[in-house]
Image: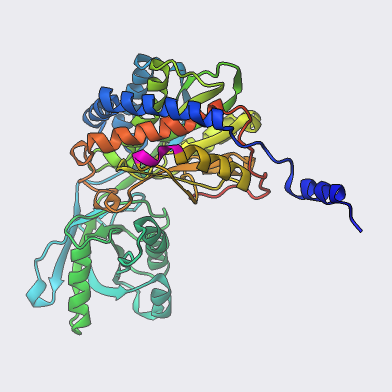
């Protein structure tokens, strides 16, 4: 028979040491700090003015462009002006893809639709069509699997992948996750089966005339996203048994890789500076709109979270490090460079938080934290209830911090209200005016509160188990 003490030893062996949860005293101090943080963010409104400046100075900052270089220099100067410490550029090589002058999808048949021009954007990474464009019959499919079943019909055609985001999913991000695979696999499959072009229904649950770009693979047929109304138009004609033909012309191209940078700044820890909490977003954006929600807002929240803590003299025990990652949209090179360059420091990386779901009103956070760490995060976030930011749901953190997952770094994603993100994501509509100052600043304060508390905890937030598998991309 086991003694109770032996049972406890077995539990400890299986579960590891149990970290102490924050005390009532500790939580009371956090609570007082959080009120000051929210008051400061909502009074000073500095994230908002910072974002306006970024959107004006460096819109369309796709990796490798002069706009991306301007964003890097803006971020460096802004971090210095905001009082961040150890501000530096960390180099990474990035791919460079250029949208062409010509992007055209015009229906040529049936007669009732001939001449209609549908709103499109080339997908990032797409090749150009043959000079002067291609004119071909349109084959409408509802999935990549359906295309493969109808492989014999694909040769010489333009394939429309009419895959809607599930409008009944309460979480548009999971609906996006369920549909976006076709944007990568579809154009490649079309190319493999001899199609001359690929058209992907835009990733939004809305029915409108706004095309949403996004990445696809380099081995693909010339590929664009069409607005959801445009996809419905073609699908309706086809469903009536009419032969649809279209003219597609794209003049985009790949150029050589160039050097770019992650931009990094810190608030050094007062007593345990070698333990680090990363907070960030990605500095690059698609070459449409201004990248306000995706992800200028998250970048500005990351800078201002540290800046306002410094102004309030809330310097925590551990180091807070803002990292604005380069090249999330079409390569993730900055994220991989950060992971590789800081490999030796990974055991000191306590947590990484990414804000890359837009900058709408806060709901809370998602996290892959182990049970002990999850309990701590929930105790801290519970203090944010009156600000609407107390949720901590199981989930990932974000693409840029995902390479740190295998090192056991707890991943946290900022979770704003998700319902309107796909009104703007990867479109001309993602501009500064689409951001509400109060929602943005509430997010800054929620993020600043959580990272401050984790950096100030008496006991370090327990790390996740190390993974054998290299981390994938979210
Ligand atoms: Zn993003």
| Quadrant assignment, res 438 | top left
Foreground residue among 67 and 45: 45
| Quadrant assignment, res 149 | bottom left
Question: Which residue is located at x 33 percent, y 38 percent?
Answer: 62
Magenta stretch secondary structure, dominant: helix
Q: Residue furthest right?
A: 1
Q: Is residue 251 above or below residue 191?
A: above
Q: Which residues are magenta?
A: 383-387
| Quadrant assignment, res 66 | top left
- Left or right: 297 as drawn, with respect to 458: left
- Left or right: 161 as drawn, with respect to 23: left
Foreground residue among 424 and 192: 424
| Residue 413, position as x, y percentages in the image | 45, 43
Question: Which residue is located at x 52 percent, y 21 percent?
Answer: 316
Question: Which residue is located at x 35 percent, y 75 percent?
Answer: 154
| Residue 374, position as x, y percentages in the image | 56, 45
């Amino acid at each position: 028979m086991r003694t109770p003490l032996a049972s406890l030893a077995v539990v400890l062996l299986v579960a590891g040491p149990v970290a102490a949860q924050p005390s009532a005293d500790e939580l009371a101090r956090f609570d007082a700090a959080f009120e000051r943080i929210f008051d400061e963010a909502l009074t000073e409104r500095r994230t908002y003015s910072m974002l306006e400046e970024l959107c004006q100075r460096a819109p369309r900052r796709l990796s490798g462009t002069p706009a991306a270089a301007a964003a890097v220099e803006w971020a460096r100067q802004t971090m210095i002006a905001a009082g961040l410490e150890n501000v530096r550029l960390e180099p990474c090589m990035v791919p460079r893809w250029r949208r062409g002058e010509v992007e055209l999808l015009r229906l040529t048949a049936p007669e009732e639709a001939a001449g209609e021009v549908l709103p499109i954007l080339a997908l990032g990474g797409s090749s150009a069509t043959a000079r002067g464009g291609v004119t071909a019959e349109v084959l409408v499919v509802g999935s990549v699997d359906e295309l493969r079943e109808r492989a014999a019909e694909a040769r010489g055609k333009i394939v429309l992948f009419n895959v809607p985001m599930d409008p009944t999913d309460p979480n548009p991000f999971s609906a996006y996750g369920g549909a976006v695979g076709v944007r990568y696999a579809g154009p490649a499959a079309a190319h493999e089966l001899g199609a001359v072009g690929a058209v992907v229904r835009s990733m939004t649950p809305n029915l409108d005339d706004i095309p949403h770009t996004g990445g696809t693979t380099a081995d693909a047929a010339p590929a664009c996203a069409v607005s959801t109304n445009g996809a419905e138009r073609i699908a309706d004609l086809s469903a009536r048994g009419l032969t649809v033909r279209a003219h597609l012309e794209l003049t985009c191209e790949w150029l050589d890789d160039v050097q770019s940078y992650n931009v990094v700044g810190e608030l050094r820890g007062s007593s345990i500076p070698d333990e680090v909490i990363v907070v960030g977003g990605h500095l690059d954006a698609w070459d449409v709109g201004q990248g306000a929600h995706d992800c200028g807002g998250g970048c500005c929240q990351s800078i201002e979270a540290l800046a306002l803590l410094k102004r309030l003299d809330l310097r925590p025990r551990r180091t807070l490090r803002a990292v604005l990652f380069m090249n999330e949209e079409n390569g993730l090179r900055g994220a991989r460079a950060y992971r590789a360059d800081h490999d030796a420091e990974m055991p000191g990386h306590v947590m990484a938080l990414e804000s890359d779901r837009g900058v709408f009103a806060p709901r809370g956070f998602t996290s892959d934290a182990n049970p002990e760490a999850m309990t701590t995060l929930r105790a801290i976030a519970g203090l944010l209830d009156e600000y609407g930011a107390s949720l901590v749901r199981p989930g990932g953190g974000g693409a840029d911090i995902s390479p740190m997952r295998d090192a056991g770094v707890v991943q946290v994603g900022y979770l704003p209200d998700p319902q309107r993100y796909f009104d703007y994501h990867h479109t001309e509509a993602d501009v500064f005016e689409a951001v509400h100052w109060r929602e943005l600043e509430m997010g800054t304060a929620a993020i600043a509160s959580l990272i401050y508390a984790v950096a100030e905890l008496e006991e370090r937030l327990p790390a996740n188990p190390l993974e054998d598998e290299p981390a994938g991309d979210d």
